[in-house]
């Protein structure tokens, strides 16, 4: 999964299903070739996206900050993700 995300070019996306909801991983920054230039959000929504912090063999870890600068994190379990290719 990590190599698939790292291979994304700017504005390219990967769609996946998690808990019966569709999400997209999109590369928004080309300054680095790692996963930190990517975000995850619900399909067809630019509101409430979260930045990808890291990808391991078990999880995609994401984070964001609210208006009060409070950080929120979430881990998508890789074994519960279904790629929509």
Image (spheres, grey):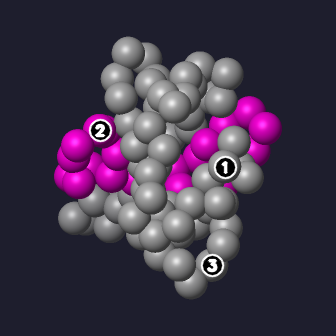
**Is 81 or 51 nearer to us in this picture?**
81
Q: Is residue 80 left or right of residue 71?
A: right
The answer to whether residue 83 is seen in the rendering is yes
Q: CA distance from mark 3 to mark 1?
A: 15 Å
Q: In the rendering, which numbered label is found on residue 4? A: 1
User: Is 33 one of the magenta-colored residues?
Assistant: no
**Image height of 23 relative to 53, above or below:** above
Q: At numbered mark 2, what does the secondary structure look like: helix, strand or loop?
A: loop
* Residue 21 on image: x %, y %: 34, 23
Give the secondary structure at mark 3. loop
Q: Which mark is residue 19?
A: none
Examine the rendered structure and indicate whether residue 8 appears above or below residue 81.
below
Of badges 3 and 1, nearer the viewer stands 1
Compared with residue 66, is residue 29 higher up or lower down, i.e. above or below?
below
Instruction: Tell me where residue 80 appears, x and y as whole percent.
Output: 59, 20
Q: Is residue 21 left or right of residue 29?
A: left
From the top left corner, tell me how far across and down residue 73 is, in percent.
Answer: 48, 47
How many C-alpha atoms fall within 10 Å of the one at disc 1: few (<14), some, or many (≥20)? few
Task: Say if the magenta span includes residue 42.
Answer: yes
User: What stretch of residues is rendered in magenta?
Assistant: 41-63
Q: Is residue 71 visible?
A: no
Q: Quadrant of residue 19?
A: top left
Q: Badge 2 local density, few (<14 within 10 Å), some, or many (20+)?
A: some
Q: At which x and y percent is residue 31?
A: 56, 84
Question: Which mark is drawn over residue 32?
Answer: 3
Residue matched to label 2: 43
The residue positioned 61% from the left and 43% from the top of the image is: 60
Choose the circle earlier in sequence order: 2 or 1. Answer: 1
| Residue at the image position 73 percent from the left and 52 percent from the top | 3
Q: Is residue 78 above or below residue 50?
A: above
């Amino acid at each position: 999964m990590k190599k698939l995300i790292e291979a994304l070019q700017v504005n390219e996306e990967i769609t996946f299903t998690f808990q019966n909801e569709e999400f997209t991983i999109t590369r928004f920054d080309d300054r680095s070739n790692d996963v930190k230039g990517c975000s995850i959000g619900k399909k067809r929504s630019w509101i409430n996206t979260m930045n990808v912090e890291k990808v391991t063999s078990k999880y995609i870890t994401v984070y964001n900050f609210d208006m009060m600068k409070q950080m929120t994190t979430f881990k998508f379990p890789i074994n519960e993700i279904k790629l929509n290719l």
